[in-house]
Amino acid sequence: MDFTRFMNKFNEIERQLSPTSALRLSFDNISPETEEPPDGNKRLWGVPVPPFVSDKVVSWIEEEFNEAPVFYNGNTVLKKVENVRMIDRYNTKNPTVGTLYLTATHLIFVEPDSNKETWILHMHVASIEKLPLSTTGSPLLIRCKTFLSVTFVIPKDSECHDVYTSLLKLFQPVSINKLYCFNYQPAKDDFPKNAGWDFFKLEAEFKHMLVPNENWTLCSMNEKYELCDTYPRQIYVPKEATTLMLISSSRFRSKGRLPALTYLHNNKASICRCSQPLSGFSARCLEDEQMLEAIRKTNPNTDYMYVVDTRPRINAMANRAAGKGYENEAFYENIKFHFLGIENIHVQRASLQKVLEACEQKSPTMSAFLNALESSGWLKHIRSILDTSSFIANAVDKGVSVVVHCSDGWDRTAQVCSLAQLMLNPYYRTIKGFQALIEKDWLAFGHKFSERCGHIQTDAREVSPIFTQFLDCTWQLMSQRSESFEFNERFLLILHDHVHSCQFGTFVGNCEKDRLDLKLAERTFSLWGFMANHLNEYINPLYKPNVDESIKANLAPQCIKFWRGMYSRFESGIHPREPLGDLLLDSKEHCNSLEDHVQHLTKRIASFKNYISKSAKKLQDATSNTAKVSKEPASAEINDNKYNYDKKLSELSAADDDHPLKASNMSFASLSLNAEQASAPQTLPEEINSVAVDWKPMRNVTTCSCSTPFDQFTKKTHCWRCGDIFCERCIDKNVALPGHDSGKAVPVCRGCFRQMQMQKQSP
Amino acid sequence: MEFADLIKTPKLDGVLLHDPGQAGTGTGAGAPTVGTLCITGHHLLLSARQENSQELWLLHKNIDSVEKRPSLTQNIVVGGIITLKCKDLRIISLEIKSAKEFFNVATSLEALSAIQNTELLYPFFYRPMYTILEDGYTMFRPELEFAKLISGVGMGGVSSPNVANITICMPSTSTTSTTLGSGGGGGIPHPLQNGYAMDALQGGLGGGGSAAIACEWRISNVNRDFSVCATYGATLIVPKAITDEQIVLSAAFRDGGRFPVLSYRHENGATLMRSSQPLSIQGIKRCRADEAILNLVLGRSRKGFIVDTWGKGKSNTETDLHYSQWKKVNRSIGNVSSPASILDSFSRLIEACNDLSCSTDKWLSRLEGSGWLSLVLNSLNASCVVAQCLDQEGSPVLVHGAKGLDSTLIVTSLVQIILNPDCRTVRGIQALIEREWIQAGHPFASRHRYSCYTPSQTRQKTSGATFVLFLDCLYQLYTQFPCSFEFSTQLLILLFEHSHFSQYGTFLCDSERERRELNVHTRTTSLWSYLNRPDVLQTLLNPLYEPNASVIWPSVAPISLELWSDLYLRWVIDQRSCATVMSQIQELVTREKELRTQALKLRKQALELGQEVSEMMSGSADDA
């Protein structure tokens, strides 16, 4: 068997084993060095190595692993350690003992007794720490960007050291080309590579806001990123802005990030974003001043506009000494200048660190927890971001345009601009709109995802939870106004995890130009494509579209809550035991299924009635005695008032078939009268059996039939056919049920799928 | 005394009402409304005398503090603002533009809200406008509740059968002839019989069987004239083998005469007892009768637990020497668990909640400083420990604090909610409150005379917020198990309000004895009579309820606790979205049910028609 076939076999096995699991890998992941020259003669464990694998990697693998590879769940295991104890914070007394597998992309811990698996993606690892030796072995503390924190106690120190050094090599690659997304392959028929990359186009998003129009125009000067390389190619500027103004303004702004339109409200008030001016103590730029005046003039309703500097005053002052700074109200006409005091990325990073420490206290008292939460300052920062966003949203709502900047205009500015839009426009509170908002204000306008998330080895001082804060603020709004959001908490968590996972190319790189240079759209999959296949999991069952145009956040400190579901997500013991969100989402799906079924039955009944009425006529004409005789026993069997009533009704409708009032009703019936259906009442039981009226209650279901235990974040899914509950892996088939009118493919379990296949084969 | 003497100004026009709560809902945006003020014997009424404007009705008993701020013009009082801080946590201000009326209104309200004579309170005047279907005062008769407790039949379920001549026995020990089985058919509420001596109740082995406890119980009327214990009810349940004389001796050994009584019997037979602390005055070292009670409860199990909710060294405890089989566990609720200190904490919490303009840091530090959530956490913690002893160890537990009137009751009632699914139903929670709080002698009148807005120096020592703490703990359980409770949190808020001020007599007085003396049961209406009316009950049900037979173990991690904003913040922060969510959930659940019925109905119809069609088809085929 040659290596390629070998690999293909693995991929196949893997797909069979875990077809929907998002976090998977293929065998070729251990050799991502595509730049190396090919060499056809290499062999590894007796099998020829594909040409793209470098000598270095082969020798490294050989050095590291003397034996042929072991496989776990179709993944090549680089290292397997048995008798490892896993300790999580709330379970320090009875650690679970199991086997630890290190693969090229994951660390997998398997508990043999309970069939429970813990998968840790290397990309999610934030830090690895070897703790001092204990009597049971050497502990390895792993903290993840998903806020999972886990300690593995490995019996032998040498083995612990092996795992430790391997992980150090794997968790944060040096080169961006080695990120997981360049190797990730979804299950065979999941979705194509190009899906999602073309979901959002900047032009379309602006067209949505009726831009370009008489005031705003598309500026073509950044087509090749000459004006500003961290901006998108299409930028929208006031029609009045001349080329000179744009160039000069760009030169006068930090990193060339000139004022550009990001949101135009329906009252002509707009939100523009930029970076700080290079004003120093006295410098000024006439063109930049004209540029801001031009922006103000696009909104004829007011004679002033706000310039919001999201930084604390003192930070802005300090920047002046470095030749940067803020707009001088004396030079810029008709502006009202505001400082709004959001701290910088370093403060936010330190704050998150303290939050995690607060969560990790060993058996804390209430006071200790509250004190730690207070001293972290996290909620204070969240509140100040919301506060600034509300200020902008209120101004725009009242018809005043706002220009926003911070230092470089890609962190705090991104946060507050997107949140203000979230408050102002219900579109952004839908799943599609929220994704579009991220595409526009975060990806296109150059939030440095790779640096802020620490995708690759980089300056640790560049890492900061800016996007996490944006999600946190969104969650705060959601918990205050849940009916206004189409998506749920799970949606935010998935977004957060994949911003860090690099499984998809969507968030790789620091700006649009980076992503183009890396050819991500060709080489990697898009998160949006993946999410499009799982939309039903992200629905907020309580969503009421268009309840109101703009929403206002309550900013009282009592209303800003700690997002337990994010930062303590993996502390399984502390969450509500009966998760409302999941239960309600399930009820919603059940309603959908029943509605569809009711629709189908209604049509069936109509067609039956139609048939009866027609043949009743025929019968009347043709025969008189024989039919009556044959029908009698049947009516004797079901001697039911309702039946008689229905019969009468059908007779009635047969009698005045030509009645004008009946026309519409009849046309509906005849429309739905599928000749095949009406003549096939024998398929009715099958149709009825194909839809479960009762769904098994979710409570007290602790394991799937595949004996995978459920914890609070594994999604329990009902089979729409039998109503039983399954884990995600077991419910990977989507088919249309004969008892549904819409013919939409819905989730069914494997058992039901097989049954349906058999029924199809032997009708 | 006549109310008229107290009311100096019965009616006053042109009063400005400032209600910050209205600002929160965004309707009035804080603008004061002008209206006419009326003061009656029990109510303060403010009406804007306009169409579609809401009238403000305030029970005087609801007023916690009256603050006067006279407005001066050239050192002469020309009126002023009266700020009323209410026990339901609302704060409103009345602006009066006349010095005389200002003082008149203020003094009237002060006097009316401070009436001490129980018989002058509103429940004695209130007459319901509806016929009472079920009298709340006879719904949860102690004899019956205890019988259910012992036999393990669902509590608070059926209406009272006539118990006078029924001998209640356990299925396992069927030595006596008749059983409880007459089940609810009788329906005639039985009047309370003081001298009625009940036949022996026999507690057998429960369903669990593992806990080898075979203590038999009986109902004792030793306290029929409240001479043994002033705060207990007249009917009590004690081990069968204990004589009334032994009880009197044990009562003398315990603080306030609160000797150990049965509170709950778990399905595995393990029993929960409560009492007050033992006394150690005048050289009393031990009490053999008290020891006998506990030893009988112990039965064949090797050990029992005594859980002290007051804190080591602060309350007296049983000596190891004389109670050798009982393990002492300290689970104090707070550093100081007195009812007054609980109220202090509650007061600090509400003060912090009302300050919307402070910084996040300040809010968190005040929340921490109030110590309220610590109290909640510790109460839950103590209850879980007790519940664990009962459920997992199968051991009997005795809970006491100092006097056994406050923290003890929190723990014993929470344990039952955790362990017993019946207590999570509407009837069950009512029965529980009746049994563990009202009959058990929690002094509601003294505790709730003053609430959080009264300055701590003017509060009496007996003031407290123990019941509020219990409700908050219950709320925490609710948030963790939102589908396991038959009632919604609205019921908890209702209980919070009615326990402070009410038109119903249920929470009047400090003990059964006082209620008996004032004939509260005949002269007032019970809150339960009102709550159990179908139209009222309907509004208090939890749409998500699905009976949950299992024990509910809550998380007691600090991070799991949630501030009860629905209650504490309802006047200052708009809680409407919370209500919207509830109504949407209701809608969704109803829709699901409706669709299910509709689908089943249509299926039947379709099958019948299908049958007919196929017959017709075969018929026509035959014809052809």
Image (cartoon, coloured by chain):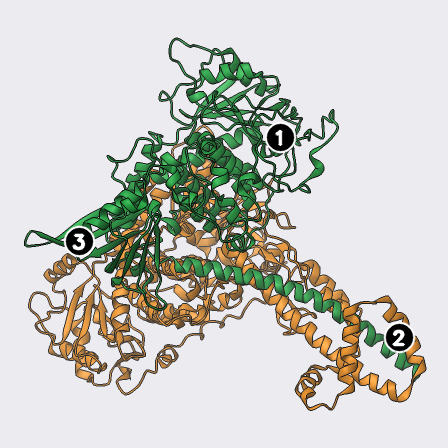
Chain colours: A orange, B green
Q: In the rendered structure, are the residues bearing label 3 and label 2 in contact, judged by CB atoms less than 8 Å apart?
A: no
Q: Quadrant of the C terminus of chain B?
A: bottom right
Q: Is B360 on the left-hand or right-hand side of A26? A: left
User: B554 left or right of A437?
Assistant: right
Q: Quadrant of residue B242?
A: top right
Where is residue A290? Give x, y as percent: 15, 80
Q: Marks 2 and 1: same chain?
A: no
Chain ID at mark 1: B
Q: Taking B5 as reference, is A329 above or below it? A: below
Which residue is farthest top? Answer: B283
At label 2, counting other C-alpha atoms closer than 10 Å, the crowd grade (few under 14, some 14-19, many 20 or more) is: some
Do the CB atoms of the residues marked 3 and 1 lie less than 8 Å apart? no
Q: Compare residues A435 and A457 and report the one nearer the observer.
A: A435
At a point 90% along the width and 88% down the height, the residue shown is: A622
Q: Amino acid at mark 2?
A: Lys
Same chain? Circles 3 and 1 = yes
The amino acid beneath tag 3 is Gly
Depth check, mark 3 against mark 2: the one in front is 3
Q: Work out whether B325 lies above or below A15.
A: above
Residue at screen point 47% across, 67% down? A525
Residue to which mark 3 is pinned: B80
Instruction: Single out the mark in the foreground, 2 or 1.
Output: 1
Identify the secondary structure beneath mark 2: helix
Question: On the image, numbered disc 1 is attached to which residue?
Answer: B150
Q: Nearer the viewer, residue B514 or B532?
A: B514
**Cα distance, mark 3 to mark 2?**
89 Å
Disc 2: which residue = A631
Q: Which amino acid type is marked by label 1?
A: Ile
Would you say residue A108 is visible in this rendering? yes
| Mark in front: 3 vs 1 | 3
Return the chain for callout 3: B
